[in-house]
Image (tube, helix red, strand yellow):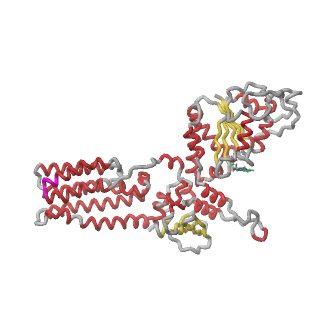
Amino acid sequence: MNIFVINGSPKGAGSNSYRLTAAFLEGMKQTLPYIQTRELFISQTDIKPCRGCFSCWNRTPGQCQIQDDMQQVIQDLLWADITIWSFPLYYFTVPGSLKNLIDRQLPMLLPFMEEKEGQVGNGNHPSRYDMSGKRTVLISTCGFYTAEGNYDGVYSLFDHLCGHRNYTAIFCGQGELFRVPELSALTDGYLSHVKQAGREYGNGGISVETQELLKQLLLPRDIFEACADASWGIEKCGGKTGENGSAPKKESDTLVFTRQMAALYRKESYSGKDIVLEMYYTDVDERYQILLGRDGSRVYTDGSLTATTKIETSVTVWRSIAAGEIRGDEAMMQGLYKVTGDFNLMLKWDSYFGSSRPQAEREEAPPSQKSTNMNIMLIPWIVLWVVPAIHKQWGCLISIGVCALVPLIFYRNKKTVYDVLTNVLVTGISIIMLAGASEKWMLPLSYLSFGVMWLGSCFRKWTPLTAHYSKNSYGGDKAFKNPLFVKTNRILTMLWGILYLCTSVFTWFLMRTPVSSLAGLINSVLPVFMGIFTAWFQKWYPAKVAAGK
Ligand SMILES: Cc1cc2nc3c(=O)[nH]c(=O)nc-3n(C[C@H](O)[C@H](O)[C@H](O)COP(=O)(O)O)c2cc1C
């Protein structure tokens, strides 16, 4: 299979349109291993405009009078089974250089007027060569927020050339985003769909699902347009010039970068209170404030607002984080940047600026992921500690009954290894007590097993127990990749584990006193305080680390 790629962007291999084309080819090569490719970058070729002399039709049939690279292009077009036309949209059609090349295909036609079945428009010249079976793909990016409604000129041109929609087209809006390294996570997601399209094309045709994915906007329109406007680094002053007729003032790269970051703000995440994020770029000594409000975001350069969250970073670090070269949470743990003030914004960063997440990641996430629930693990233990102390036989039977009911909850909630372990341990201890073992031994033993379960999960290679439950508020399983989240949970899990080891010893003594039947209740007092401490610690500790203290 021979594939000929014609790229019509002046930026050649570094162009947005070629990025998409390369992804498509990569996909095709996976399903069609025996393909040969020839590529032509118009920006590097010498193709002069057609002179309109018609020599190629009368004096030298099939041969153009102009000697340049076009002779080879015609050879390549005849050689190819599939021609991929890759180009940016210029004034709602193909760039002039590409139009030149199209015009110069005249020697490939015969001069006679001949009607063709299914032809578009009135009038047709037959082909000089047998072009049957050859296929055409169009891959293009444009600058507006959508390709929808902007490609009429292109469709019209290629309908006339190839027959009505007798080609495969991938047209992508927001093309300039492919050039922004900070958005690579987002654009890589789109490129993976283009690659998938290449794979499917190689297998016979692009599926409807993939076509739909290719039509999706990279960013919502308002966010894209704000981001695009900010990228020019010039004020919108009537669209013409700055003060006194001078050229518009150019903003610093750091301010442009901050404006683009602000443009990514998702106002749907507004929590009812304005947030002022202050960015202090240490290496360039520039400070900007971003107001995140109900109606959108605004960048302040005069420092007039009171910051709620302050980030102190070098531009290089922040750009690397934005480009996905380093993980934000890891950079924080390494002390590469500091955060002071309200840490909540950092914890919910993804929902405030989530549009920079890879599109693939957004789509792959199951729509309604089941969450875990710590009560599923706690309730059987609480029942075991309280009820058998009141009435041993009934208490043990009730504990076993509760454990038997737990699997029903797994229809709604995701089970953890600790839910399962709890079920086994509580059922086992209840059965042993039913068989006659004394609660004076079994109750302390139950606290001991509970504590060991918590402490055991703190070993380095495992994820600490509390993390399996608190992950629900931090984006699910991907929170496990966040070292700060894991460390916070490891400390908390360890403290809870120690508390319950101590409780087992305390209970052993308590069970030998007249208030032994109240052991379960007495032992609930400390965990209440520990719960309050946990709620405070899980906010305080990450904030302390982020502040570099
Ligand atoms: C001269 C010129 C004309 C353009 N005309 C349009 C246009 O009509 N519609 C549009 O959406 N984008 C237009 N653009 C934007 C480009 O299509 C867009 O930047 C594209 O992603 C560039 O792709 P490339 O990197 O492959 O050259 C134009 C850009 C230039 C330089």
User: Which of 286/166 is in front?
Assistant: 166
Q: Residue at x 78, y 44 (%)?
A: 96
Give the percent coordinates (x, y) of residue 86: 69, 41
Specify whether residue 103 is painted magenta. Answer: no
- Tell me: residue 149, above or below residue 232: above
Q: Magenta segment, principal secondary structure? A: helix
Range shown magenta:
391-396
Q: Residue at x 64, y 28 (%)?
A: 1
Give the farthest residue toward the top. 130
Q: Residue at x 79, y 33 (%)?
A: 122
- Tell me: residue 193, above or below residue 426: above
Give the percent coordinates (x, y) of residue 157: 74, 39
Residue 312 visible? The answer is: yes
In-image side of 404 versus 539 (left or right): left
In-image side of 149 versus 341 (left or right): right
The image quarter in which residue 390 lies: bottom left
Give the percent coordinates (x, y) of residue 144: 67, 52
Give the percent coordinates (x, y) of residue 424: 23, 48
- Tell me: residue 230, above or below residue 364: below
Q: Quadrant of the C terminus?
A: bottom left
User: Which of 368/175 is in front?
Assistant: 368
In-image side of 436 versus 4 (left or right): left
The image quarter in which residue 118 lies: top right
In-image side of 445 versus 354 (left or right): left
